[in-house]
Image (cartoon, coloured by chain):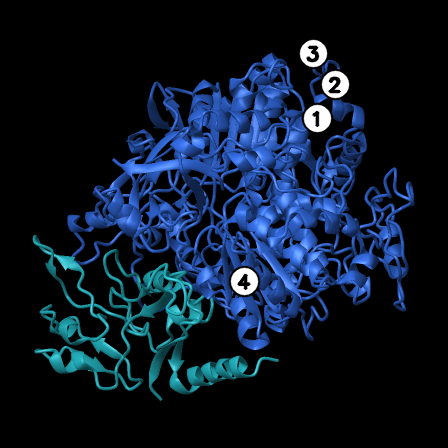
Amino acid sequence: MPVKFLVDFTRCIKCTGCEAACKQYNRVPTGVRRIRVVTINEGKRGQYTEKHIPLMCFHCVDAPCMKACPVKAIYKTKDGVVLVDKDRCIGCGYCLWACPFGAPQFPEAGTFGSKGIMDKCTFCLESFDGEKRDKPVAMCAAFCATQALLGGEVSEITKEYRERAAGRILPL
Amino acid sequence: MAEIKLSRRNFLKATLVSGATVALSKYFGDRKFSPEELFSTVEAAEGEGIKVKRVKSICSFCSIGCGYTGVVKDGVFTHIEPWKDHPINQGGMCCKGASLVTVTNNPRRLKWPMKKENGKWKRITWEQALDEIASKMVEIRNKYGPDAFFFCGLVHGSNEEAYMFRKFAMLWGTNNIDHQARICHSTTVAGLLATYGHGAMTGTTISIEHTKCAFFFGSNAAEAHPVFMRRVFNARDKNGAKIIVADPRFTRTASFADLFMQFRPGSDIALLYGIIHEIFKNGWADEEYLKDRTYGWEKLKEVVQDYPPEVVEDITWVPAEKIREAARIMAENRPVAVIWSMGATQHSTGTYIIRALAALSLVLGSQGKWGGGCIPIRGHDNVQGVTDLCVLSHFLPGYYSVKSEKSWEWYAKVFTESGKRGLTSGSITFDELKSRFDVIKDGPLKGKSLMTMPGFTVSNWYQGVLRKPIEEIDQNCNIRAAFFWGEAMSSIKEIAKQKEAFEKLDMLVIVDPYPTAASALPEKEDGIYLLPAATRQEGSGSVTTTGREWQWRDPIIEPQWESKTDFEIFKLLAKKIDEKMGKAFMYPFFDYKTIEDVTREINIACRPIGLQGQTPERLKRQKENAHTFDPHTGKAIGGPCDGEYWGLPWPCWTEEHPGTPVLYCDEYHPKEGGHDFRAKWKYPEGDPKAGEPIVREKWDKPWGSRHWTYAYVFDMSGKVVKQALEEGNPPTGRGKARIYVYEHFDKIPVHREPIESPRPDLVEKYPTFPDIEHKYRMVKYPLETEQKRAVAEERYRKYPIVLTSGRQVEHHGGGAQTRNSPILAEIQPECYVEISPKFAILNGIKNGDWVWVETARGRIKVKAKVTERASIDVPPYTVAFVPFHWNGVFQGQDYSNRYPKDGHGLGAELVVGDSVNIIVSTGVDSITQMQETKVSLCRIYKA
């Protein structure tokens, strides 16, 4: 079963626990945001009140970045996690053009802040400095303070989400 | 690459993160950092034979008490993982907790003792530091007396270290000891204690899941207590709970509200009374509950007649229909949890606001119920514990009042008993203890022993340095030495005066894992000592959550560099003092072998709130068996802790008692955690039952009776407590909650305008209290005088915007730890003032521009954050917000260069900013001296 993220934005409070959890677990340096909580309509009230959404790589089944990469540096594991081979990557940035979510990150390198090698969310399978782990266990979701961010096997997260939805339809 | 000489155990190898260059400087303003400084990484452990250890512990930031697992590879703390079966947070943490490894492993930490000499910082040994500090202490004490000292802080300390700190001051001979609770929830403690008998949160974080209506009154829990929101959302999603938010600002919490009331800071009581008015008017008050369990509710009903929604609308900005709607939602969705934090407490009427909140809970009949009650969420990981162990100038550990000689007799007995049981080797009589204190030598209080006079508070400590003895302060001498033992000076008001005070001191000792702004702010050539304290990840001890739950911490790693735990520092300092004094003055009372011995002394000593059941063994056993606790009730089901509540929330009367998760809940037997309002007051003169004990009207359960309080607080044997429980009563009896408090100036709270008010007409109608006299060592503290002066100076015209301060989720307290973390500094690098788009355009300000925020106390330079959250330009909602976690800049002048440096990364915090507490109001609560940081008048203009 593939691994996915599901954001319940009736619960995200932008505590950025997910951002910090990722940074410390994957030793991500300053300037690279594998996950980032985005706020829309900040301060607006009423029906379209502000909402916060953690955005990271969504490990698309049909990943546009994989198609765009000219050197075929991006590949997918059997769990459905999309990874980049940093030895092949040339830092051209096409994957960023292709990604609808802005997941690819480029740590700055060189005199003019030119792009470095692409880094992005790996569902915690790989740290920034290349430590590899065997199971995709998303630390961001594990640390989410309000359980807004669910991450893991699709069957498990949809089960949790359905229970929540049922509770909203039929409060006791 | 900087070589840091460390023991092999603590070796951190800084690796160059690929591609990171000077370009990273843009993330931290104009400051330039080398990559090693920014983020020390640990070489990935490779190969076999690397020992990986996982240690469970409790987060050291806020008071929710989240659990986490620290991972240690071959002696090096590498990262943290979630502790999924921790009953309170179930693995979840906010960004601060998740960044703990960067706070512990940080080259910007204080590594060894330092001293400022001739304007330069130099490294010294522990031996030299303690020698000089102790010598100076003895010299000052001999010359001026024990009250020439001010001890403050340790809010992050364990319960044991807090107890040792208070004990230290007791034996030193002064009550000039206080901590952050003074400026945080001191009004909560005073208000709730006067109403119910205990001054703490009446439920636990877990119990919030059972609420039907979460009423946030001056609490931005989404940013201040993120994990708390987990339980609120559970209540919303599973219980259909409603969320009402009342706040001067449309906070992140407010964005989740079913009803949001934006109200003027300082008009709190008026708003609450508008709601209570409607509850009474529509017959929604639980009169049966009020008659049975409360005293004085009829008088409240009378007073709220002066606060119909139309009148309240003018005072508070909140439209009358919204006030009615709020009352209706609460009435239809009970139990209601009344939740607050600094929004309610930090006012000159703070204690009275809390009493009004307590009254609201009673009127709804929601007090003493699961999911109801009063929920003041506290700030630091152990502020509840440090409050309970009374690092306060007016209490002794366990809430024995310093004003009564009986409390001191008790402690002489406790210290001697501790010696008898081998926890320490000391013994002392009451007379010996009293002889250590000074006596007032002159003036109207001549002859009074300073032992029974509350000392200076943290909010006014500097007055002790700057003002004249006897004439302006109630002691014989000035404060000449201060110990900032884990205290952030930038969270205290009047920073300009504090700066003056620091500069005037003979000696300033800072004990902290980081140097903090107190080391750099004063322009002082000599006399500052920095002692490196170990972090909370490097020592053991117990901590108390906001829900009165005790949790045991084990160390993740040993103290790094030359840092020492506070436990050790107290012992070493006590020993040195005795050496300098030439007699066994302090150390026999501090020669504990282990920190658990201190816990045992607390179990002996602190009786009023029932700290007898929280033994080290029980706490550690709970930790081992966390998985047996039900995360939705906090109760252990099966296993070695069967029947216990997580954390054994106090009162935990005996070693068999399960703890009391919901205070005042009379629905089950006290042996199972049942409780009741405290029966410690009598009907006052003029009442038909004058002189009789106030106990509840009726009692028809198969256990217990309408009993007066048992005489258990001075019973060291514990027999009286056991007898009470056998009789089916809590030892505190079965009293009534007091809505009418006869010893207070306002027996029923009334609205009073804040010291700096934008409405002079309302100041006329609802003036503040008379000036305070002879309290907490201040001969006189102006309240009425200052309010009148503010109106006379037309501050409401010159400074038309109401300034309020508050939190950012990424930072904590004074920010010395969080602003040094590369993770947190990146997520939140700025101090700013929130202004609305319209205000920005009208004043020629763009997002990110520097602006001045000016009040009658001076001005600060911060960035302008243009956001729709701010409503400055929408009359009457003219409120500006500045977060308070910032220092390093003083009124626009950066003083980062005055921070100590050690060639290994130490310096100012990664991100610095101006401190809003330089410019906030000078108002204080009339009862506790809480500072009125929530209401000041300001103006904002481009720099």
Residue labelled with disc 3: B441
> Looking at the image, which residue is at 41% across and 60% down?
A15
Q: Name the mark on residue B453.
A: 1
Query: On what subunit does the disc labeled 4 rest?
Result: B
- The type of residue carrying mark 1 is Met
- Is there a contact, CB below 8 Å, between mark 2 and mark 3? no
**Amino acid type, mark 4:** Ile
Question: Do we see residue B199 in this rendering?
Answer: no
Q: Which lettered chain is shown in cyan?
A: A
Q: Which callout, 2 or 3, points at the residue further toward the start of the chain?
A: 3
Q: Which residue is mark 2?
A: B448
Q: Which residue is mark 4?
A: B244
Quadrant of the rendering where the C terminus of chain B is positioned: top left
- Mark 1 and mark 3 in contact (Cβ < 8 Å)? no
Is B832 on the left or on the right of B204, as rendered? left
**B925 vs B543: above or below:** above
The answer to whether A103 appears left or right of B740 in the picture is: left
Which mark is first along the chain, 2 or 4? 4
Q: Earlier in the sequence, mark 3 or mark 4?
A: 4
Please tell me if label 2 and label 3 are on a single chain.
yes
Residue in the foreground of this view, choosing between B531 and B878: B878
Chain letter tied to blue: B
Q: Secondary structure at mark 1?
A: loop
Report the Cα–Cα distance between label 4 and label 2. 50 Å
- Tag 3, which chain? B
Kind of residue at badge 2:
Lys
Q: Which residue does the image show at 31% across and 44% down from the upper left?
A: B911
Question: Disc 4 versus disc 1: distance between alpha carbons?
Answer: 42 Å
Contact between labelled residues 1 and 4, with CB atoms less than 8 Å apart: no
C-alpha distance separating marks 3 and 1? 14 Å
Q: Are marks 3 and 4 in contact (CB under 8 Å)?
A: no
